[in-house]
Image (cartoon, rainbow, N blue to C red):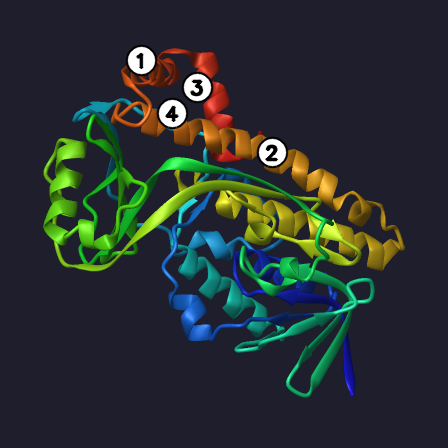
């Protein structure tokens, strides 16, 4: 027998679960299929910032509880250049929150299931006929009117698009990050720019901290023993930090990627399946939420009014937004890294980058544009 649903959603990350909740609240049936186990998905440690646009979006869709609980604990934050704290004024209209991605995923999952949603884990699928989407796994066949590919950069959905139908644009950055998870509460949070390189220290719940350190491409975790990580964090921030056991470390390459178009026949790509931004920008969740909302509005209008115009414009609408934030992500990534260690791009670029940074503190116009982009409302 063949099951039928309006939307087959592949992937139970932020994009897929947000989409599922939006459709559910509008009485449009969907099935979410996830290759991994629920335990794996909800324990996967990833950064998470829901900016002002995202917070307002959740509340507009009646999902405000997703962001009203689970944010980071209050800690002293700062922005440091060569150990000197820089003044940061937070816009009164800024509603952005930090929330670990796994916490957001857990809350979205609970909400979807409590509403009677159909969410299936450990499902290894094959896709057939993207013009009339058909999904197979084991002895099950699911037909859908639309297929939402929310399964990330290495997922099966984008890989099912015929060769040549999509164009990939990408940029690899000339440095990487050491990313370490430490079993110690963060008493300080923020970013440090130093001639030794960039550093980041971010809370992960009440008990853990995430540490970031700029490093050369080609470094391995073995090049970064725990003692070196803590030493570099303190040196680059110029202040003592609470130390503790490091329970995970990895090297993260930085890259920007966009696939055009973001749809093919009745397959629509959302989130990392369509684009990737470097983590410095904190815009991965922002773009995933924008895609989910844009696609949800298109499906709702099609089902309710028989008007497919929003779905037809999905790729164009999203790409206009994606490229705007890719430009921001590339700019802030270059700026924050170039202003530190001159061995990557030279002393001249270091000085011009620092002048650009200083402008953000001294110019109301520059700060206004920066604030609109960081809050996601531009």
Residue 323 circle label:
2
Pick the quarter of the image with the C terminus. top right
Instruction: Give yes or no for contact between labels 4 and 1 (Cβ–Cβ under 8 Å).
Output: no
| Residue plotted at (30% across, 23% down) | 339
Dot 1 surroundings within 10 Å: few (below 14), some, or many (20 or more)? Answer: few
* Front residue (pair 368, 198): 198
Residue occupied by mark 1: 348
Residue occupied by mark 3: 367
| Residue 23, image quadrant | bottom right
Label 1 residue SS: helix
| Residue 362, image quadrant | top left
Camera-near label (3 vs 2) is 2
N-term mark: 2 or 4: 2
Label 4 residue SS: helix
Residue occupied by mark 4: 335
Q: Is residue 49 visible?
A: yes
| Residue plotted at (50% across, 21% down) | 369
Real-space Cα separation, disc 4 to disc 3, in angstroms:
15 Å
Instruction: Give yes or no for contact between labels 3 and 2 (Cβ–Cβ under 8 Å).
Output: no
Real-space Cα separation, disc 4 to disc 1, in angstroms:
13 Å
Q: Is residue 240 left or right of residue 260?
A: left
Camera-near label (1 vs 2) is 1
Real-space Cα separation, disc 2 to disc 4, in angstroms:
18 Å
Real-space Cα separation, disc 1 to disc 2, in angstroms:
28 Å
Whole-percent x and y of residue 145? 80, 65
Label 3 residue SS: helix
Whole-percent x and y of residue 50? 47, 45
Camera-near label (4 vs 1) is 1
N-term mark: 4 or 1: 4
């Amino acid at each position: 027998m063949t099951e039928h649903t309006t939307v087959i959603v592949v992937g139970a990350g932020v994009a897929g679960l947000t989409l599922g909740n939006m459709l559910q609240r509008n009485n449009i049936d969907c099935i979410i299929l996830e290759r991994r186990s629920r335990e794996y998905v909800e324990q996967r440690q990833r950064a998470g910032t829901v900016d002002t646009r995202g917070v307002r979006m959740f509340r507009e869709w009646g999902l405000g509880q997703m962001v009203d609980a689970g944010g980071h604990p209050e800690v002293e934050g700062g922005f440091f250049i060569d150990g000197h704290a820089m003044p940061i004024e937070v816009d009164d209209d800024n509603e952005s929150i930090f929330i670990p991605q796994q916490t957001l995923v857990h809350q979205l999952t609970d909400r979807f299931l409590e509403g009677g949603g159909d969410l299936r884990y450990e499902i290894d699928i094959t896709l057939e006929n993207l013009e009339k989407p058909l999904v197979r796994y084991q002895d099950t066949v699911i037909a859908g009117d639309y297929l939402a590919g929310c399964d990330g950069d290495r997922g099966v959905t984008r890989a099912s698009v015929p060769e040549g139908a999509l164009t990939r644009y990408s940029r690899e950055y000339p440095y990487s990050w050491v990313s370490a998870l430490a079993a110690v509460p963060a008493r300080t949070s923020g970013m440090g720019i130093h001639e030794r390189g960039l550093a980041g220290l971010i809370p992960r719940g009440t008990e853990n901290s995430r540490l970031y350190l700029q490093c050369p491409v080609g470094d391995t975790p073995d090049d970064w023993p725990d003692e070196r990580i803590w030493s570099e964090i303190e040196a680059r921030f110029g202040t003592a930090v609470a130390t503790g056991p490091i329970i995970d470390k990895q090297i993260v390459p930085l890259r920007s990627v966009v696939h055009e178009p973001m749809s093919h026949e009745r397959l629509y790509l959302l989130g990392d399946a369509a684009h990737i931004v470097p983590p410095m920008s904190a815009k991965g969740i922002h773009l995933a939420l924008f895609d989910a909302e844009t696609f949800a509005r298109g499906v709702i209008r099609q089902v309710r009014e028989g008007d497919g115009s929003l779905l037809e414009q999905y790729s164009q609408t999203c790409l206009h937004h994606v490229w705007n934030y890719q430009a921001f992500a590339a700019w802030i990534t270059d700026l924050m890294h170039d202003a530190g260690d001159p061995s990557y791009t030279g002393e001249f670029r270091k000085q011009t980058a620092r002048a650009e940074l200083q402008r953000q503190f001294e110019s109301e116009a520059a700060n206004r544009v920066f604030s609109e982009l960081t809050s996601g409302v531009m």
